[in-house]
Image: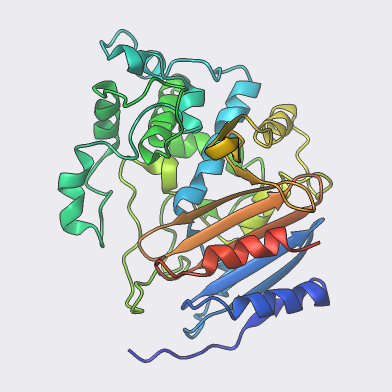
């Protein structure tokens, strides 16, 4: 397959930021690449890549976020808590299947545990792998529907007592999604739209593929395309698709002083809540987390971020609270060991004054 190098496109913001993004883009090899920065609502977007651009500009294409979907789930939970509809300490099994007999450790798992990866659940259910391995590179999740995720949770035997250890878990965040749907009597997709997407004006964000030609196409390392991701029953953990411009809108809502800050009190409270550190882990407790974001210190103050990857795409979201700086990045090549994408996007967030 012969790849053609497309001329990069920059949406003007500030000349200095435009030069910074153009330089950063040289470090990333992908068919499609978007690097976007917002400074107090002033946006600079650089697009490029090794493939010829299509009829829809790259910054208007919807990209698969993978695990970078989790901040959306976290903001949804925080808003429902602010509205008094659920509590962080509500037990998931009681909301999901009242009266159903479960392991005592499962009974103790709360909504907070599920969101913060402290539930004791594994990354994925044990019975997920037999059906996934034969189609690992094409459709590992599509054959594991929502009811199966729920059943796996209700019969689970957590590895650790809830709240005692941190272990990243797509399984847990997916259970959170199903639990919130059960608690509110509203399907997850509708709930997310009502509580997060519509209030923030995220009209180009969704959890399913859009009309033909509007979704970015992922690629393997050799450049061959891969099918669109089907997350099966793991929607809350990784199904969000969004344009880079919508990603900036989402991040701008988290930064103080950005234009268009929400006036709804429950949404404003939720946006504040998800930026507060809630746990530390690792050697000397060096790793800090909020409800939904990883947090690192920098010379310019703390940065909050989350990355994600699917079968053929990558995404990075990050911001510096109180400074008006936000960074969104997307790429359409599968992650690999020597990949520079996340490091490049992270550098824009941590090295930019």
282 shown above or below 224: above
Figure label count = 0
At 51% from the left and 32% from the top, the residue drawn is 116
Judge by depth and name the residue closer to the eye, 71 or 299.
299
Judge by depth and name the residue closer to the eye, 33 or 244.
33
At 62% from the left and 56% from the top, the residue drawn is 246
At 50% from the left and 47% from the top, the residue drawn is 69
> x, y (%) of residue 218?
40, 68
203 shown above or below 191: below
Left or right? Give the position of 216 relative to 154.
right
In this orientation, does residue 187 appear?
no
Q: Residue furthest top?
A: 99
Q: Residue furthest front?
A: 284
Left or right? Give the position of 121 relative to 72.
left
Image coloring type: rainbow
Q: Quadrant of the N terminus?
A: bottom left
Picture quadrant where residue 106 is located: top left
Q: Quadrant of the C terminus?
A: bottom right
Picture quadrant where residue 264 is located: top right
110 shown above or below 273: above
> x, y (%) of residue 230?
32, 53
At 39% from the left and 38% from the top, the residue drawn is 169
> x, y (%) of residue 100?
27, 11
In this orientation, does residue 81 appear?
yes
């Amino acid at each position: 397959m012969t790849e053609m190098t497309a001329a990069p496109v920059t949406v003007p913001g500030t000349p200095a930021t435009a030069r910074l993004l153009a330089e950063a883009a040289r470090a990333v090899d992908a068919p499609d690449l978007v690097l976007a920065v917002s400074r107090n609502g002033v946006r600079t977007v650089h697009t490029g890549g090794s493939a010829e651009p299509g009829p829809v500009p790259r910054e208007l294409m919807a990209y698969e976020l993978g695990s970078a979907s989790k901040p959306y789930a976290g903001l949804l939970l925080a808003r429902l808590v602010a509205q008094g509809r659920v509590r962080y300490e509500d037990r998931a099994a009681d909301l999901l299947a009242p009266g159903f007999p479960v392991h005592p450790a499962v009974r103790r798992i709360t909504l907070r545990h599920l969101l913060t990866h402290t539930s004791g659940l594994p990354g994925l259910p044990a019975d997920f792998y037999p059906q996934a391995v034969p189609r690992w590179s094409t459709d590992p999740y599509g054959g594991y529907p929502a009811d199966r995720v729920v059943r796996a949770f209700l019969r689970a035997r957590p590895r650790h007592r809830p709240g005692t250890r941190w272990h990243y878990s797509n399984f847990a965040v997916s259970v959170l999604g199903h639990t919130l749907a059960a608690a509110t009597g509203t399907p997850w997709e509708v709930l997310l739209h009502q509580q997060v997407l519509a209030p923030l004006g995220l009209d180009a964000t969704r959890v399913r593929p859009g009309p033909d030609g509007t979704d970015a196409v992922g690629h393997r390392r050799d450049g061959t395309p891969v099918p669109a991701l089907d997350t099966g029953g793991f929607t809350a953990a990784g199904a969000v698709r969004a344009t880079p411009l919508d990603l900036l809108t989402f991040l701008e809502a988290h930064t103080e002083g950005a234009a268009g800050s929400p006036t709804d009190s429950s949404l404003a409270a939720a946006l504040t809540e998800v930026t507060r550190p809630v746990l530390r882990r690792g050697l000397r407790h060096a790793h800090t987390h909020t409800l939904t974001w990883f947090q690192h210190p920098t010379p310019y103050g703390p940065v909050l971020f989350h990355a994600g990857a699917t079968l053929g795409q990558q995404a990075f979201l990050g911001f510096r609270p109180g400074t008006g700086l936000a960074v969104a990045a997307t790429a359409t090549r599968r992650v690999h060991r020597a990949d520079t994408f996340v490091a490049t996007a992270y550098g824009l967030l941590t090295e930019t004054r």
